Image (cartoon, helix red, strand yellow):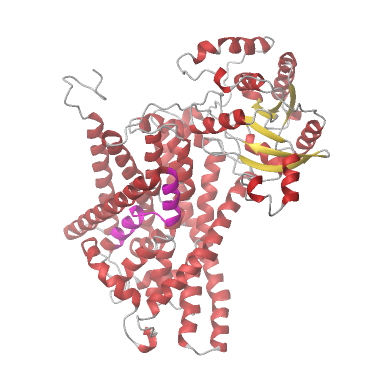
């Protein structure tokens, strides 16, 4: 559901009754530390479907929605997570500013019962600025069969009664608890005006933060004098001895990724894709084409429906199961608690190239969609780190590139394509690391950044949350197919089917508009092995949406909807040297690398312009085009050289990928260990 900030002065004339009702409804601020279940509570109270996650950047701006409690109407505002009213990150800045600008709004402060002592620090600060703070203590699960949780609830009640604050203990995922909490809220008489402390009374100096707040920490400790101390920290697990092992952690992470790719692109994903492809082509597509042929015999109308619509759109839609699987596995990694461990795992590595563990979340989201991933880069408190993180997201292979790897890679490398796909994903990561290292050394030096990380307990992923994540992404994918991809396929078909004097080239002859334009650009790509107008035209259309690349190739090569599998036809067509778009193993790999690294879609570019400015957006596009061209050129010629020596295709690809990886790692190492001119001894960052 679309949730936006309400601006009454803009809507008043159009719908004055609605605006007046919203103005009367009191506004409640939902505030809490990250990972306390804030967005889950927001969804439960307002019946929304906002994304829930246990990492930074899930909520990056305030969200508002009305809800009813008892017979009263309220507007609930979900604010980004924060640990203190003294902001140390972008999210905290957004939340604290909103709180101070709305001093009269009552506050619902959510805390985690397992981390209550730490969470109460924010509660104590909120009490100083607001007379109306209601504490929601999240139990996360049903306490009936959990004696340890029952004990925590008992101890928490004793402590909170000493604090003298209104509180409610429950699980936001439990409908009965939410019903009771709504009833609890409806009975509270909120004050009309607050007389708390102002923003200026909170220290902004990080160095004296502990000293200034020492009394608050002591006060919180006194509340828990009866609490039985535990030697086991919340969120730790015996599993961490494996997943965070010094020697096993990174290999395990890459093995998990490899398994995800195998199940997505082969095995389960390939089987489900085949079933959907048969349904689209043999059941739906053939009937549509048969109906059109029965109605008219106009060649261009039949070709538009058969090639432009059914063939083009169907070729992309058939990959829906693999897209679903990819998002399914990413949501499992996120909801299981493993994603936070991954951020911790790469924090030290990323710090050496001017990033932080927060960047891990953004880059992993880039495997799904570069557009949404680049938005989360705004949670970086350092401007240079924010720019770098945003610039790196397009180097992650988004789900839109999945059909390219499956079709082109599958045609030439068969069962070995799993290694190609995994290698391409890793190549994107390596290029991103190298680029960040260069930017850190030469252009965008980052300041030290805070990274407060909590380890949520390992848990079985919630079916509801996973389903919601899948549904949102599937819905977006289908909307793209039904709007952008559908429209662009028709545009590409028109340019490919008609000449500049509007003759239908299949029956009347001549050169199509797209062939004329593409032939002019194509020579630039001859050194990369795919200097034909069809391949170049597909790349140009891919600037709008990467999914169009495969459907464009299918259209250019004239696949027949009434024939066998659309995917099989497309794969066979690119093997034919006489086809409009054809490749060799070397040029196919070069083409896939170029698709991986060249300019992102227009949606991502528009986000870049808003988040990091026009200058860095242009720099990003030029960098990507240059890097894509150089690496494609290198891989194409390296592969040709290895082929000349006589090594098999699969081994040649692996050698090429390993060679590139080693070269990248070596260059990063040289940059990190490079001494500056002012140093005589060993130094990492010139400390005089």
Q: Looking at the image, is 130 positioned above or below residue 342?
A: above
Would you say the magenta stretch is mainly helix, strand or loop?
Answer: helix
Q: In front here: 363 or 155?
A: 363
Residue 330, x across and y down, in percent:
51, 45
Q: Is residue 636 left or right of residue 231?
A: left
Is 242 inside the magenta-drawn segment? no
Quadrant in which the C terminus appears: top left
Q: Position of residue 203 (x, y in %)?
A: 52, 17
Residue for point 73% across, 32% down: 142
Measured along the vertical axis of the image, is residue 494 above or below residue 585? below
Magenta span: 588-611
Image coordinates of residue 328 in percent, x first then y, are: 55, 49
Give the quadrant of residue 99: top right
Q: Nearer the viewer, residue 345 or 478?
A: 478
Q: Position of residue 245 (x, y in %)?
A: 43, 28
Q: Is residue 522 left or right of residue 290?
A: left
Quadrant in the picture for residue 54: top right
């Amino acid at each position: 559901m679309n949730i936006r900030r309400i601006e009454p002065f803009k809507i008043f004339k159009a719908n004055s009754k609605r605006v007046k009702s919203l103005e009367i409804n009191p506004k409640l601020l939902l505030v809490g530390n990250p990972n306390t279940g804030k967005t889950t509570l927001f969804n439960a109270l307002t019946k929304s479907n906002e994304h829930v996650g246990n990492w930074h950047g899930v909520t990056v701006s305030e969200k508002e929605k009305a809800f009813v409690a008892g017979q009263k109407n309220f507007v609930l505002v979900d604010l980004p997570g924060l640990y203190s009213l003294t902001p140390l990150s972008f999210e905290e800045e957004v939340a604290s500013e909103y709180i101070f600008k709305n001093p009269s709004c009552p506050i619902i402060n959510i805390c985690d019962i397992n981390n209550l002592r730490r969470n109460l620090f924010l509660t104590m600060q909120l009490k100083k600025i607001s007379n109306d703070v209601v504490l929601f203590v999240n139990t996360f699960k049903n306490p009936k069969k959990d004696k340890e949780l029952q004990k925590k609830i008992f101890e928490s009640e004793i402590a909170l009664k000493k604090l003298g604050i209104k509180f409610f203990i429950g699980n936001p995922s439990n409908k009965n608890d939410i019903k009771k909490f709504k009833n609890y809220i409806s009975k509270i008489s909120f004050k009309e005006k607050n007389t708390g402390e102002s923003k200026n009374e909170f220290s902004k100096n990080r160095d004296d933060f502990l000293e200034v707040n020492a009394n608050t920490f002591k006060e919180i400790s006194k509340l828990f004098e009866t609490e039985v101390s535990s030697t086991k920290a919340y969120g730790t697990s015996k599993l961490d001895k494996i997943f965070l092992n010094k020697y096993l952690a990174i290999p395990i992470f890459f093995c998990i990724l490899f398994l995800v790719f195998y199940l997505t692109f082969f095995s389960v994903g390939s089987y489900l894709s085949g079933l959907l492809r048969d349904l689209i082509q043999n059941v739906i597509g053939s009937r549509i084409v048969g109906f059109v042929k029965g109605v008219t015999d106009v060649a261009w109308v039949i070709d538009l429906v058969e090639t432009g619509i059914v063939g083009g759109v169907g070729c992309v839609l058939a990959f829906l199961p693999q897209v679903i699987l990819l998002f399914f596995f990413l949501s499992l990694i996120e909801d299981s608690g493993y994603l936070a461990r991954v951020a911790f795992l790469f924090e030290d590595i990323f710090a050496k190239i001017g990033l932080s563990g927060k960047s891990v979340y953004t880059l992993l989201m880039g495997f799904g969609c570069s557009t949404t991933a680049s938005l989360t880069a705004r949670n970086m408190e350092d401007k240079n780190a924010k720019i770098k993180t945003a610039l790196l997201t397009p180097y992650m292979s988004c789900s839109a590139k999945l059909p390219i790897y499956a079709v082109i890679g599958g045609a030439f490398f068969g069962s070995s394509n799993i290694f190609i796909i995994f290698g391409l994903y890793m190549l994107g990561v390596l290029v991103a690391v190298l680029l960040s290292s260069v930017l850190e050394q030469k252009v965008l030096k980052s300041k030290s950044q805070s990274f407060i990380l909590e380890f949520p307990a390992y848990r079985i992923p919630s079916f509801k949350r996973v389903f919601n994540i899948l549904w949102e992404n599937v819905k977006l994918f289908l909307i793209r197919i039904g709007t952008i991809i559908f429209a662009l396929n028709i545009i590409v078909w028109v340019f490919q089917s008609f000449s500049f004097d509007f003759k239908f080239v299949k029956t009347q002859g001549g050169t199509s508009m797209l062939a004329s334009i593409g032939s002019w650009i194509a020579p630039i790509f001859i050194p990369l092995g795919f200097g034909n107008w069809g391949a170049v035209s597909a790349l140009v259309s891919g600037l709008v949406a990467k999914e169009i690349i495969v459907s464009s190739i299918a259209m250019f090569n004239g696949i027949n909807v009434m024939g066998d599998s659309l995917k099989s036809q497309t794969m066979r067509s690119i093997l034919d040297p006489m086809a409009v778009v054809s490749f060799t193993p070397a040029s196919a790999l070069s083409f896939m690398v170029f698709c991986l690294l060249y300019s992102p879609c227009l949606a991502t570019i528009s986000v870049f312009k808003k988040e990091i400015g026009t200058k860095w957006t242009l720099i990003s596009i030029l960098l990507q085009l240059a890097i894509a061209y150089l690496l494609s050129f290198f891989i194409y010629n390296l592969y040709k050289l290895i082929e000349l020596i006589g090594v098999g295709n699969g081994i040649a690809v692996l050698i090429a990928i390993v060679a590139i990886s080693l070269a990248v790692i070596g260059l990063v190492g040289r940059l990190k260990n490079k001494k500056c001119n002012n140093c005589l001894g060993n130094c990492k960052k010139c400390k005089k």
